Image: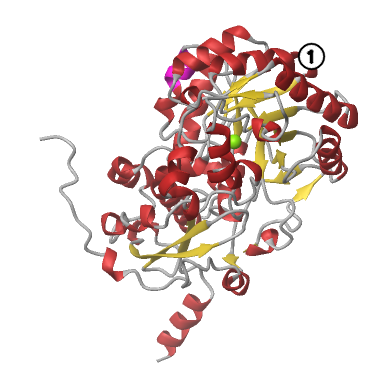
């Protein structure tokens, strides 16, 4: 009795998560958050030792991409991250389809870190920095001027941000006569069917845009829309950028995203107009897999070219880098395949002389994953942040700095795993996605999902 009492006392005062070799995955559940800034499918991976790992599927994606992998991970030791990643890698794809594999890889690292008592950045090789520069994406909804955008960006600088990005796209000219040229009637189609996507970036992508005529219009690639920008249109865009610079000055980096679905030749004409305005990079000016389009524009302008947030697996960046098509790669840790894939991409950046900025438009789980990676990768310009205007975002996770940002930088957590001790369940409950209710509900139907997973015979 005396001995049992002593043992009880000891076990009450020791870390019961101290048997990493015996750790086993017992369950995987999800909660679909909305508005942080977009639809964020959050993941919990449960274990036999009470440890819970946090992960997240890429923004504006589906929890199904993670849940379909549950049966492949149950009973496995989450500390064997690489082994399990290789088991599930075949089920990832580009853009949002990479979100399940990537989000689970992050949850595995979180568990491994908690089990062994080390932060994620340490498992990736240690730090190049203990605080990370954040760049702040800034949208101004609806019709506005470069002065309006300049003032919005200036407000970001006053909040401490030291690196800026704005959207600048052809939608601003949809009602400006003589600025755009397209097969007659097509611009009307864009106004009618995809206006929401192109004029309201924050939370823009939802189910309604992915059906019927909306989907058809929304998914016409840049080179196939037939839209051209006239000289008057280029004057309009150049004037906009000049106005922005007149407000924010020339000393702060300014990147540009979402130019629109315009052929590469007109994008080159636009880029040449941008050259006097010291643009940090132009982003996603063509579907990323058209290597020749990227090489063509990179050779034609001095504006640095950037893409990558939709690329799954580090090796798929290499053709673009080999062709000289990008000066900056822009991976999302929740699309590329997770933290180790991002680390491997940094090796390609070294080989080809390409900088990295990290895309991030997710909850604090995705943000912490990005911060740990940015800490462990040498040539990172900055990590994106999309949630400045969401007052409750920072409170979603307990254990991280709050406020997260000081003078435009975020400190890299030193606590084990991602550095999140727990999630704010009440706050998550207040922001559960109305179309995907439920919070960490049982997912037993996914326990027996099965296929012959060998990809060769
Ligand atoms: Mg982007």
Find residue 72 and report its horizontal and vertical position in percent.
27, 54
Q: Nearer the viewer, residue 242 or 129?
A: 242
Direction top: furthest residue: 299
Question: Where are the magenta residues, as a range?
Answer: 318-322
Q: How is the image coloured?
A: secondary structure
Residue 234 visible, this angle: yes
Q: Is residue 424 above or below residue 295?
A: below
Find residue 396 and report its horizontal and vertical position in percent.
63, 63
Quarter of the picture holding the C terminus = top left
Q: Secondary structure at mark 1?
A: helix
Find residue 154 and report its horizontal and vertical position in percent.
86, 39
Q: Is residue 370 left or right of residue 77?
A: right
Residue 303 visible, this angle: no
Q: Is residue 316 above or below residue 449?
A: above
Q: Nearer the viewer, residue 19 or 196?
A: 196
- Residue at position x 35%, y 58% in the image: 67
- Residue at position x 67%, y 16% in the image: 271
- Residue at position x 65%, y 50% in the image: 413
Direction left: furthest residue: 457
Quarter of the picture holding the N terminus = bottom left
Find residue 206 and report its horizontal and vertical position in percent.
51, 53
Q: Circle 1 is placed at which residue position?
A: 276
Magenta-highlighted stretch: main secondary structure? helix
Q: Is residue 28 above or below residue 240?
A: below
């Amino acid at each position: 009795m005396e001995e049992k009492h002593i043992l009880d006392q000891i076990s009450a005062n020791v870390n019961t998560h101290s048997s990493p070799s015996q750790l086993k995955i017992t369950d995987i559940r999800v909660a679909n958050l909305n508005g942080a800034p977009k639809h964020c499918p959050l993941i919990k991976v449960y274990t036999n030792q009470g440890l819970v790992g946090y992960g997240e599927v890429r923004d504006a994606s589906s929890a199904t991409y993670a849940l379909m992998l549950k049966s492949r991970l149950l009973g496995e030791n989450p500390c064997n991250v690489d082994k399990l990643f290789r088991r599930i890698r075949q089920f990832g794809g580009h853009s949002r389809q990479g979100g399940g594999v990537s989000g689970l890889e992050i949850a595995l690292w979180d568990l491994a870190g908690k089990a062994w008592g080390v932060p994620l950045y340490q498992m990736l090789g240690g730090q190049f920095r203990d605080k990370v520069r954040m760049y702040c994406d800034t949208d101004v909804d609806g019709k506005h001027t470069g002065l309006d955008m300049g003032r919005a960006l200036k407000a970001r600088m006053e909040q401490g941000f030291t690196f800026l990005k704005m959207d600048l796209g052809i939608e601003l000219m949809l009602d400006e006569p003589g600025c755009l040229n397209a097969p007659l009637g097509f611009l009307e189609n864009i106004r009618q069917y995809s206006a929401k996507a192109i004029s309201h970036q924050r939370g823009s992508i939802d189910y309604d845009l992915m059906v019927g005529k909306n989907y058809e219009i929304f998914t016409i690639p840049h080179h196939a829309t037939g839209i051209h920008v006239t000289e008057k249109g280029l004057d309009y865009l150049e004037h906009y950028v000049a106005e922005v610079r007149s407000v924010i000055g020339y000393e702060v980096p300014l990147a540009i995203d979402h130019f629109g679905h315009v052929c590469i030749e007109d994008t080159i004409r636009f880029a040449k107009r941008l050259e006097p305005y010291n643009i940090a990079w132009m982003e996603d000016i063509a579907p990323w897999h058209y290597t020749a389009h990227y090489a063509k524009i990179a050779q034609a302008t001095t504006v640095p070219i950037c893409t990558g947030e939709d690329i799954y697996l580090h090796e798929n960046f290499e053709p673009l880098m080999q062709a000289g098509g990008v000066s900056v790669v822009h991976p999302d840790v929740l699309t590329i395949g997770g933290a180790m894939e991002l680390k491997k991409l940094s090796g390609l950046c070294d080989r080809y002389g390409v900088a990295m900025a990290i895309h991030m438009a997710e909850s604090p789980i995705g943000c912490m994953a990005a911060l740990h990676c940015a800490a462990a990768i040498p040539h990172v310009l900055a990590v994106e942040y999309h949630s400045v205007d969401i007052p409750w975002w920072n409170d979603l996770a307990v254990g991280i700095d709050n406020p997260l940002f000081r003078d435009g930088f975020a400190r890299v957590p030193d606590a084990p795993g991602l550095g999140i001790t727990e999630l704010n369940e009440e706050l998550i409950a207040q922001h559960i996605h109305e179309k995907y209710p439920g919070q960490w509900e049982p997912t037993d139907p996914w326990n027996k999902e099965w296929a012959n997973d060998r990809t060769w015979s």
